[in-house]
Amino acid sequence: MDKEPADLFPGFDTRHIATDLTDIHCRIGGSGPPMLLLHGYPQTHAMWHLVAPALAEHFTLVLADLPGYGKSGIPPLGADHEAYSKRTMAAAMVTAMDRLGFGRFHLAGHDRGGRVAYRLALDHPQCVEKIAVIDILPTYDYWARLDRAFALRIYHWAFLAQPAPFPETLIGASMIPFLEHTLASWTGAKSLTAFAPSALDHYRTAFRAPGRIAASCEDYRAGAGIDVEHDAQDRASGNKIEAPLRVLWGTTGIAQSGDTPLSAWKNWASDCSGTGLTGGHFLPEENPNDVITDLLTFFR
């Protein structure tokens, strides 16, 4: 059994909040207006450990593990992958925040958490004060522009979305090397140097826990099917994000392509701004100071 990793959020409370989907594990700390922070693949809420102390001086932070990740519950796997759709995950997050007493809140998400965040803003506009997404394009746009160069950059989208148990079996045969390769290859430096050893302990422990690899693959299967359908419906109907949207991306990150991510996001939000920051995909750990400065300026 793995030793419990070091606490990266001293002074923060720990809560497990029941929702119709599954229990949501979160850490809560700070003071001020509520802000929900959502992590991405292949990480947990621990990815916020370098930016949380500064944000907690101005906001009450809720650092949640996505359903299926970290210490949150694992929803049942299904043929339609609906339990792992970003719509379903977003609804669970709305319930969790409501049960904490936060009916309206600021929202920021990285990677898969960014997808849950923008889906939450589209489906539950009354809940979102402001929203920031970090180093992603909308799911619909990713699939639409998947040419040779982009496919090589996000090969894992197709791999993880293959029918079970193919990707689970391959990853399970060498899970920690796969995790560490994924983390390193998405950074600007192509190494693990951006990640604190204590944070890596969290990621390794969570990744090897029973059921977590299958859950993350279900997340990507939903991303190749039902999530695209939901995005397409919004595009067809003209539904846009109502809250002010801030878009951050790494200048050597995954989202950067021939044009800026901002140009894609302007099709999804009426009030949209953004900038590239030095670093790769994992900006909150590769370049926490610039992320803190930008988020505080935007949300305050």
Image (spheres, grey):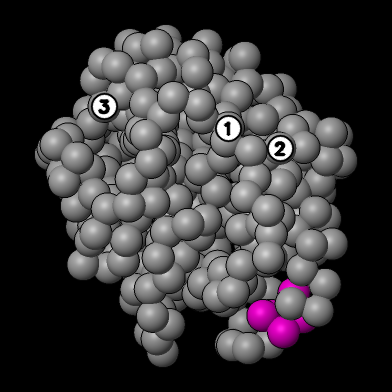
Name the element at disc 2. helix
User: Left or right of 156: which side holds 88?
Assistant: left
Whether 192 is drawn above or below 204: the answer is above
* In the displayed structure image, the side of residue 210 where residue 33 appears, left or right: left
For the residue labelled by badge 3, is the local secondary structure a helix, a strand or a loop?
Answer: strand
Q: Which mark is residue 34?
A: 3
The residue indicated by pointer 1 is 8
Is 179 one of the magenta-colored residues? no
Cα gap from disc 3 to disc 1, whole angstroms: 20 Å
Q: Is the residue marked by circle 2 packed among few (<14), some (14-19), or many (20+) residues within 10 Å?
A: few
State the extent of the magenta-drawn residues as a range: 167-171
Looking at the rendered structure, the kind of residue marked 3 is: Pro
Q: Which mark is residue 198?
A: 2
Marks 2 and 3, how far apart at CA: 26 Å
In terms of depth relative to the viewer, which is nearer, 260 or 117?
A: 117
**Disc 2 residue type (three-letter):** Ser
Q: Are marks 3 and 1 in contact (CB under 8 Å)?
A: no
Q: Is residue 236 visible?
A: no
Pick whichever, 171 or 24, lies toward us.
Answer: 24
Q: Position of residue 185 (x, y in %)?
A: 81, 48
Q: Is 170 within the magenta?
A: yes
Per the model, the C-alpha gap separating discs 1 and 2 is 8 Å
